Image: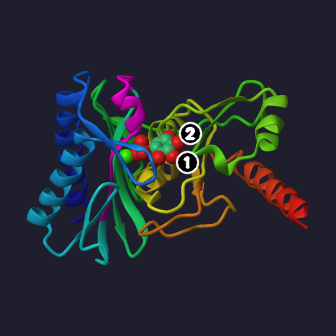
Amino acid sequence: MEHEYLEFAKSVAYEAGEVMRKYYGKKPSFRLKEDETIVTIADEEINEMVIKRVEHAYPAHGVDGEESSAKKDSKYLWVCDPIDGTALFAREVPFSMFSLALVIDGEPVLGVAYDPFHNKLFWAAQGEGAWLDDMPLQVSQAKLDNRSMVNVEASYAISSDARMTLEKRGVLVTSMGSAVRTAVMVASGRMEAMIFGGTEGKNVDIAAVKVIVEESGGKVTDLNGKEQRYDGAINGAIVSNGMVHDEIVQYMQQQYEKEKSHEI
Ligand code: IPD
Ligand code: CA
């Protein structure tokens, strides 16, 4: 059955990619959401397509999508970010990705992330390894030093102090605009970590990459280094090659303690 779910997720990802390519570079219409972020017609069309595909294939399952959802209380929940990096997509920067995970009882068991610009599919299922098309993925073995790279998204989660500490050690610190894309870069060993500050409604950014990165040998937790559920709001995420994980958790703790002492 798991295999069938994986094939289903892959075929949905390829269909989502077709929609992204259809609108890319053609100035798709967009509107601002309540949180003042952009959503395009492509995000909404993909989200609707995912709901229809799930309803047709697995009527008892639910969908938690960034733009719309159905049967969100189901035990089997397809968690989807139709386009991660929408702001880049709307600006014609080819860096955004589609992502979809099957989450059972809060735990992601398989994930796919599709890059429609290069026709590259990252995919993984628990216990089956992680793959870029048919090549196995492996995280880096690097520590935090002047050869390493850490990406920060939704960066309100990481203080300028924590960022400076990393930069002083020579780490290249970036904010590239897509949590999913940079997380799969961790999975493929191109960077050491991605720190993500998203909470409410942001499980959609991390559910699929949780499986992809961990099956590549890495680690994914909340900002305190703890496991968390992916069927509702999350407490940010630290996505890493495993080796640098505890150190980043430590930086985050130091940051919280400092913020607390300033409050007193
Ligand atoms: C966004 C991206 C971005 C992060 C934002 C997210 P979206 O997702 O993941 O990297 O910094 O917080 O909202 O809105 O493009 O799906
Ligand atoms: Ca999105």
- Looking at the rendering, in which quadrant would you find the C terminus? bottom right
Give above or below for 101 relative to 171. Answer: below
The disc, 1 or 2, on the residue closer to the chain's N-terminal end is 2
Give above or below for 27 relative to 251. Answer: above
Viewed as shown, does residue 62 lie left or right of 195? left
Residue type at mark 1: give it: Gly
Front-most of residues 133 and 106 = 106
Identify the residue under disc 1.
217
Viewed as shown, does residue 6 lie left or right of 173? left
- Looking at the rendering, in which quadrant would you find the N terminus? bottom left
Q: Which residues are magenta?
A: 78-94
Q: Residue at x 77, y 40 (%)?
A: 160
Callout 1: CB less than 8 Å from ligand 1 = no
Front-most of residues 258 and 165 = 258
Q: Residue at x 57, y 45 (%)?
A: 154
Q: Position of residue 136 (x, y in %)?
A: 41, 38
Front-most of residues 19 and 8 = 19
Which label belongs to residue 139? 2
Whether the magenta-drawn stretch holds residue 86 is answered as yes
Q: How is the image coloured?
A: rainbow
Whether the magenta-drawn stretch holds residue 65 is answered as no
On the image, which quarter does residue 152 sit in?
top right
Q: Position of residue 130 (x, y in %)?
A: 41, 45
Query: Mark 2 and mark 1 in contact (Cβ < 8 Å)?
Result: yes
Residue 179 shows in the view: no
Residue type at mark 2: give it: Val
Could you classify mark 2 by the number of other residues whose Cα lies within 10 Å: few (under 14), some (14-19), or many (20 or more)? many
Count the marks: how many?
Answer: 2
